[in-house]
């Protein structure tokens, strides 16, 4: 009874791999293509203090039909060669799965447990720093107390700090465990 379930899980994993591979190959292929073709990247915009996002328009060539077809062929070729190179490495290098497991457990734990609290703390600090302090002009209007504001900010920051500590612990634990497993498997193969 486990055989059909195992087959379904393997098929679903294959679908996940086939649908997520373009998310990795396309940007990497475009970067490699840009370096090969000598395309100059525009310098990054200076960071803004308020943390706003700037969206730039993309310039299109005047003769789009001829340049697009030749550009598409070269971009597709670079993407294909990059995917082929990755496939050859994964097949030919012994224990490549262990290396991927080590990198994966390190990166996934960081992305899941450590970066979200850091991002939230950074955003909360920037938002809180830019909030104006209200001053009561008459006695009936409540004054925004800076102490109350700091207390309301402190509770989420304490939770973020705890999650960050937990994240660092998870990263260290999973990375050490996977590295020890990798070394144990290497000793068994000798």
Image: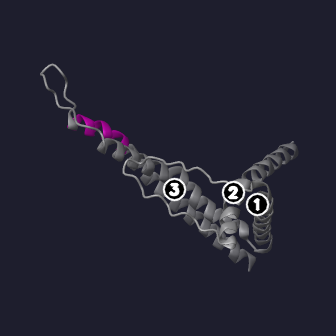
What stretch of residues is rendered in magenta?
147-157
At a point 65% along the width and 72% down the height, the residue shown is: 38
At a point 13% along the width and 22% down the height, the residue shown is: 138
Q: Identify residue for label 3.
A: 170
Of discs 3 and 2, which sits in the foreground? 2
Residue 128: x and y, percent? 31, 42
Please name whichever residue, 84 or 116, is drawn nearer the observer in this view of the structure: 84
Residues packed near mark 1 inside 10 Å, few (<14), some (14 to 19) or many (20 plus): few
Q: Is residue 189 magenta?
A: no
Residue with the most extreme left position: 139
Task: Look at the numbered discs 3 and 2 and tell me whether their residues touch, using CB distance below 8 Å.
Answer: no
Taking the image as shown, residue 80 lies to the left or right of residue 41, namely right
At a point 76% along the width and 72% down the height, the residue shown is: 89
| CA distance for labels 1 and 2 | 8 Å
Taking the image as shown, residue 159 lies to the left or right of residue 184, namely left
Q: Identify residue for label 2.
A: 61
Q: Identify residue for label 1.
A: 67
Figure quadrant of residue 68: bottom right
Taking the image as shown, residue 23 lies to the left or right of residue 177, namely right
Of discs 1 and 3, which sits in the foreground? 1
Of the two numbered discs 1 and 2 on the same chain, state the one appearing first in sequence. Answer: 2
Of the two numbered discs 3 and 2 on the same chain, state the one appearing first in sequence. Answer: 2
Please name whichever residue, 39 or 139, is drawn nearer the observer in this view of the structure: 39
């Amino acid at each position: 009874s486990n055989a059909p379930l195992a087959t379904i899980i393997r098929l679903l994993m294959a679908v996940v791999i086939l649908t997520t591979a373009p998310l990795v190959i396309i940007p990497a292929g475009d970067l490699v293509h840009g370096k090969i073709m000598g395309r100059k990247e525009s310098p990054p915009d200076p960071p803004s203090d308020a943390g706003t996002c700037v969206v730039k328009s993309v310039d299109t060539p005047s003769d789009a039909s001829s340049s697009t077809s030749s550009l598409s062929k070269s971009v597709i070729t670079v993407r294909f060669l990059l995917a082929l190179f990755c496939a050859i490495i994964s097949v030919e290098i012994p224990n490549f799965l262990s290396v991927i497991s080590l990198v994966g457990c390190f990166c996934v734990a960081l992305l899941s447990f450590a970066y979200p609290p850091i991002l939230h703390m950074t955003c909360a600090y920037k938002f809180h720093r830019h909030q104006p302090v209200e001053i009561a002009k008459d006695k009936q209007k409540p004054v925004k107390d800076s102490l109350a504001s700091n207390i309301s900010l402190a509770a989420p920051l304490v939770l973020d700090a705890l999650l960050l500590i937990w994240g660092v612990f998870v990263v260290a634990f999973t990375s050490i465990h996977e590295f020890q497993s990798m070394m144990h498997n290497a000793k068994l193969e000798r």
